[in-house]
Image (cartoon, rainbow, N blue to C red):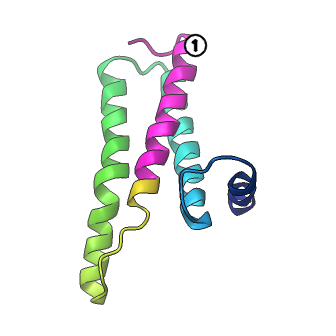
Amino acid sequence: MMKKIAIWLNEHAVCLGDTIKANVVHLWCILISAIVVTLFAALGWKGKAMEVLLMVLLLGGYVVPPVVEAVRALVKREPWTPWYWFPIAIGNTIGTGIALLVSLIFGWATL
């Protein structure tokens, strides 16, 4: 289903990725990060707790994927090609921004 949405967005809107595969990764990351941040904001996480959650999302989206790909490339003796690093980073940033905006509108999170 995400692939169909990515193809539709690629035909009718501006997409961030240059391939359908990258657009699917964008969509999944936006969806997952938006749901996680909105859920925890609705549960009452504020201040330092929300900062820790955002740091975990940043670590999971920006640091872990290229390291995992590097280890995989070393083990399989293949070239290091973390093609999904930027789509994950951009998707996490957009999803978190959307979720924080929604959380601020509903009064769950404060700055």
**Residue at the bottom extreme, as displayed:** 77
Is 12 placed above or below 1 here? above
Residue 47 lies in quadrant? top left
Q: Secondary structure at mark 1?
A: helix
Is 80 placed above or below 59 here? below
Residue 62 location (% of width, % of height): 33, 51
User: Residue 53 versus residue 65: which sits nearer the camera?
Assistant: 65
Answer left or right for 92 relative to 48: right
Is 43 placed above or below 71 here? above
User: Residue 36 versus residue 44: which sits nearer the camera?
Assistant: 36
Residue 63 location (% of width, % of height): 28, 54
Residue at 32% of width from left, 71% of height from top? 69
Q: Is residue 90 magenta?
A: yes
Q: Is residue 28 magenta?
A: no
Answer left or right for 77 relative to 104: left
Residue at 58% of width from left, 66% of height from top? 21
Quick one: label 1, few (<14), some, or many (20+) residues within 10 Å?
few
Q: Which residue is mark 1?
A: 105
Residue at 31% of width from left, 87% of height from top? 78
Q: Main secondary structure of the magenta part?
A: helix
Answer left or right for 4 relative to 64: right
Is 8 placed above or below 57 here? below
Which segment did they paint magenta?
Answer: 88-111
Residue 5 lies in quadrant? bottom right
Residue 94 location (% of width, % of height): 50, 38
User: Residue 18 versus residue 67: which sits nearer the camera?
Assistant: 18
Picture quarter with the C terminus: top left
Q: Amino acid at mark 1?
A: Ile
Count of numbered circles in the view? 1
Picture quarter with the N terminus: bottom right
